[in-house]
């Protein structure tokens, strides 16, 4: 049937076009209630989840907006703290306490200067002097005794610093030499004991002084006691030995922090490399020597998301090769920072506990490999799937307008309606709209530029025309080749076994174009040859369509047994691969035309798949195909009879451009919807299928003629063989 302009008109009427739009912000996941329900289930249950949907749906933005409205218990503060120069532990503190601990530790590190002052105080110096005097007195007593013994033997004892010497007539007696050695060793031992005693004295004084500083902190931060005790011991060691203390090695390294009542952390990490996920341990290289400490531990996304949500791209996990490591981390419930492969083992870091929900986001293709891993379904049990389209309803239009207003656009009613209709056109469904909000926003941005900040019906239309113009170069070259006859296409007259089949270019931009399909019949036995398939240009689905055509011919003309004909089909001037079954109807009518030797109209183009019963089935990209043939007819000259035959099942997908609709209203172009191959043949020939001298009679007559020719060939072959 021929479709009227009224049946083809799909655009939303625009009322009060220049009136500004004022609409509230829609809730997150508007139109995606199934995905929202799944995500709510994951949030309530504390399950890891994954969001699946095509690109440009705004999945990340929607998820971030939704999670920002969630309220959870404020997570604790987590820190890395040193227990020694070689060992680091994880410290958990109540929320908000990390600042007070850091301030207290900073004050303790300043005690190094106060300890130096402590050892200059008079009370310490008096005790030190007394201690040194006792050791000096004991040493003087030993020396005096040795001096008397030497005098009795006629020798004199002299001292040169710590060195003792005996001088006198002749060699020193063995007994006196042994006594000298004994006193010398005793003096050295006494000096060592004095040093130990002085160190002990400094340590005791330091611990006594530090105890007054640390005891209140033990009470205030009981969870940090091991850390504080280690810091106190290190300060005491400094006091005892004077070993320099690097403050950076002993400051706490804050990993996560939150104050009471704040929303949970929401961390989106687009590049899921191991260091960005698990953190890393940095090193300082000084003259070839590697060194590190707790301050050089850099937190990763896992640390920053503690107590909240971590959002990752599934494709990034696969591309960066971190899925296996991330899977182990989730299973074990802990992670360790990544270290340099060539770095020496120097710091023992306690594994960090994982306390967060992970949400993966990606396209169905990104999850194909992951979903095959049995561990994936164990870890990510909730699948939230986004629909690629939304209902085309007034509610959806209002939600789209509110969302665009929240994005900062100035909209008129006309501009919103044109964007809404363009979303419907992108979905190729009158009762659905494209859910790819990012694409709609991109068109609104271009319209705002052309409209000097205002998104109106006119500026949206200008943006659409500008988009088409930017990508029209290849189509202009094609139309020029058609006009010059380089590409052989006819849009007038009739021809036997020829039809204009509609195809879509598989490389962007995806223009629809007519392609001349020819069929030739000759005597033979049940052969249907696709030249494109034989040349390796046909895909699997394309080949299936050819086999379906063969099934239709056998079932419809079974009275002839095996078909006495060989059919060859070809897309003329085609040099690229062909895929899909949308040429099935064109192949069928061209084949029957070649068998029955009746001409087909060349001013009509054909698209549609067929089954083995001859029923015409819906195809994709229907608008691009119709508009592609219209452009060719316009380039060669509109005759008023041209048009397209398409499946009736595609009526709901027709959202044609305004230019095509106006041509239909003016009677310059026509759209015909069919349900069977027979209806298409009647339109292409102007004749009836059944009845006297109908098309079926001509097809059967053609088959009978081919059968006689085939029998004659067989008889001649038998005679020649004898």
Image (cartoon, grey):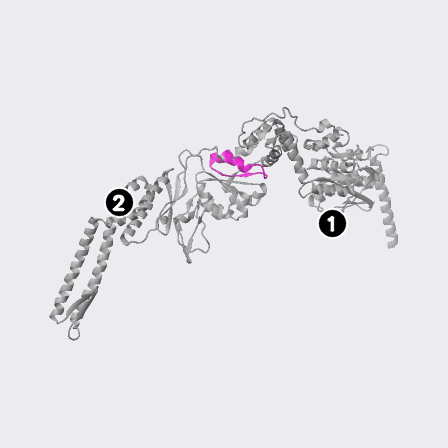
Q: Quadrant of residue 407?
A: top right
Given the current orientation, which residue lies at the most extreme front position? 452
Q: Residue at x 21, y 57 (%)?
A: 194
| Residue 20 sits above or below residue 517 on the image | above
Visible residue check, residue 618: no
Decide if residue 444 is on the left or right side of residue 535: left
Q: Earlier in the sequence, mark 2 or mark 1?
A: 2
Query: In the image, residue 76 lies at what x, y percent?
Result: 39, 39
Q: Residue under circle 1?
A: 535
Span highlighted in magenta in the image: 40-66
| Residue 275 sits above or below residue 598 on the image | below
Decide if residue 466 is on the left or right side of residue 26: right
Query: In the image, residue 483 lies at what x, y percent?
Result: 78, 41
Tag 1, which secondary structure? loop
Figure label count: 2
Quadrant of image for the N terminus: top right
How far apart, in angstroms, are the residues tagged by discs 2 and 1?
Answer: 91 Å
Given the current orientation, which residue lies at the most extreme left position? 152
Q: Is residue 44 magenta?
A: yes
Query: In the image, residue 246 lies at what x, y percent?
Result: 35, 50
Dot 2 alpha-carbon crowd within 10 angstroms: few under 14, some 14 to 19, many 20 or more: few
Q: Between 594 and 165, which is closer to the camera in this rendering?
A: 165
Quadrant of image for the C terminus: bottom right
Q: Quadrant of residue 664?
A: top right
Q: Residue under circle 2?
A: 211
| Residue 420 sits above or below residue 306 on the image | above
Given the current orientation, which residue lies at the most extreme bottom position? 170
- Mark 2 or 1, closer to the camera: 2
Q: Quadrant of residue 566?
A: top right
């Amino acid at each position: 049937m021929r479709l009227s302009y009224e049946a083809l008109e799909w655009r939303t009427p625009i009322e009060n076009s220049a009136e500004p739009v004022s609409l509230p912000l829609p809730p997150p996941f508007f139109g995606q209630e199934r995905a929202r329900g799944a995500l709510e289930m994951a949030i309530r249950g504390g399950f890891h989840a994954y969001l699946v949907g095509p690109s440009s749906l705004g999945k990340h933005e929607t998820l971030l907006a939704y999670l920002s409205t969630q309220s959870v218990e404020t997570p604790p503060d987590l820190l890395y703290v040193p227990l020694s120069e070689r060992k680091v532990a994880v410290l958990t503190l109540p929320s908000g306490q990390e600042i007070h601990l850091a301030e207290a530790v900073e004050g303790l590190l300043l005690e190094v200067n106060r300890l130096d002052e402590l050892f200059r105080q008079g009370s310490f110096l008096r005790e030190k002097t007394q201690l040194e005097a006792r050791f000096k007195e004991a040493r003087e007593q030993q020396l005096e005794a040795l001096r008397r013994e030497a005098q009795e033997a006629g020798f004199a004892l002299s001292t040169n610093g710590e060195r003792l010497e005996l001088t006198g007539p002749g060699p020193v007696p063995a007994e006196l030499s042994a006594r000298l050695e004994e006193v010398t060793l005793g003096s050295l031992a006494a000096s060592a004991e004095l040093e130990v005693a002085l160190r002990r004295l400094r340590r005791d004084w330091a611990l006594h002084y530090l105890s007054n500083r640390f005891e209140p902190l033990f009470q205030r931060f009981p969870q940090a006691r091991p850390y504080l005790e280690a810091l106190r011991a290190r300060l005491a060691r400094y006091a005892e030995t004077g070993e320099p203390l690097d403050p950076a090695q002993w400051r706490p390294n804050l990993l996560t922090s939150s104050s009471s009542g704040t929303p949970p952390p929401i961390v989106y990490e687009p590049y899921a490399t191991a260091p960005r996920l698990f953190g890393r341990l940095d090193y300082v290289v000084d003259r070839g020597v590697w060194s590190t400490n707790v301050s050089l531990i850099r937190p990763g996304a896992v640390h920053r998301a503690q107590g909240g949500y971590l959002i990752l791209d599934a494709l990034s996990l696969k591309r960066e090769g971190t899925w296996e490591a991330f899977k182990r981390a989730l299973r074990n419930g802990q992670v360790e920072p990544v270290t340099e492969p060539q770095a020496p083992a120097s710091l023992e870091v306690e594994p960090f506990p994982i306390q967060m929900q992970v949400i993966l986001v990606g396209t169905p293709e990104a999850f194909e490999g992951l979903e095959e891993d049995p561990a994936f379904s164990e870890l990510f049990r909730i699948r939230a799937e986004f629909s690629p389209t939304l209902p085309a309803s007034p509610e959806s239009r209002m939600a789209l307008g509110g969302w665009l207003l929240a994005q900062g656009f100035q909209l008129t009613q006309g501009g919103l309606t044109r964007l809404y209709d363009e979303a419907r056109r992108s979905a190729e469904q009158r009762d659905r709209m494209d859910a790819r909000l990012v694409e709609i926003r991109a068109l609104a941005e271009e319209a705002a530029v052309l409209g000097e900040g205002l998104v109106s019906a006119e500026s949206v239309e200008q943006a659409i025309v500008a988009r088409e113009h930017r990508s029209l170069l290849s189509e202009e070259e094609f139309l020029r080749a058609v006009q010059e006859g380089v590409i052989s296409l006819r849009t007038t007259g009739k021809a036997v076994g020829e039809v204009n089949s509609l195809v879509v270019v598989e490389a962007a931009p995806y223009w629809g174009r007519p392609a001349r399909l020819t069929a030739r019949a000759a005597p033979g036995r049940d052969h249907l040859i696709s030249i494109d398939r034989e040349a390796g240009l046909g895909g699997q689905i394309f080949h299936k369509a050819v086999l379906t055509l063969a099934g239709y011919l056998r079932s419809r003309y079974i009275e002839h047994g095996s078909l006495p004909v060989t059919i060859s089909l070809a897309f003329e001037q085609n040099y690229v691969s062909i895929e899909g079954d949308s040429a099935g109807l064109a192949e069928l009518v061209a084949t029957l035309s070649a068998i029955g030797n009746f001409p087909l109209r060349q001013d009509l183009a054909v698209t549609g798949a067929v089954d083995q019963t001859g029923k015409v089935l819906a195809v994709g990209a229907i608008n691009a195909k119709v508009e592609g043939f219209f452009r060719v007819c316009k380039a060669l000259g509109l005759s008023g009879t041209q048009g397209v035959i398409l499946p009736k099942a595609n009526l709901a997908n027709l959202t044609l451009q305004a230019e095509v609709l106006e041509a239909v209203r003016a009677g310059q172009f026509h759209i015909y919807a069919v349900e069977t191959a027979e209806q298409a043949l009647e339109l292409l020939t102007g004749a009836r299928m059944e009845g006297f001298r109908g098309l079926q009679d001509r097809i059967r007559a053609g088959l009978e003629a081919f059968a006689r020719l085939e029998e004659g060939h067989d008889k001649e072959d038998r005679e020649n063989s004898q």
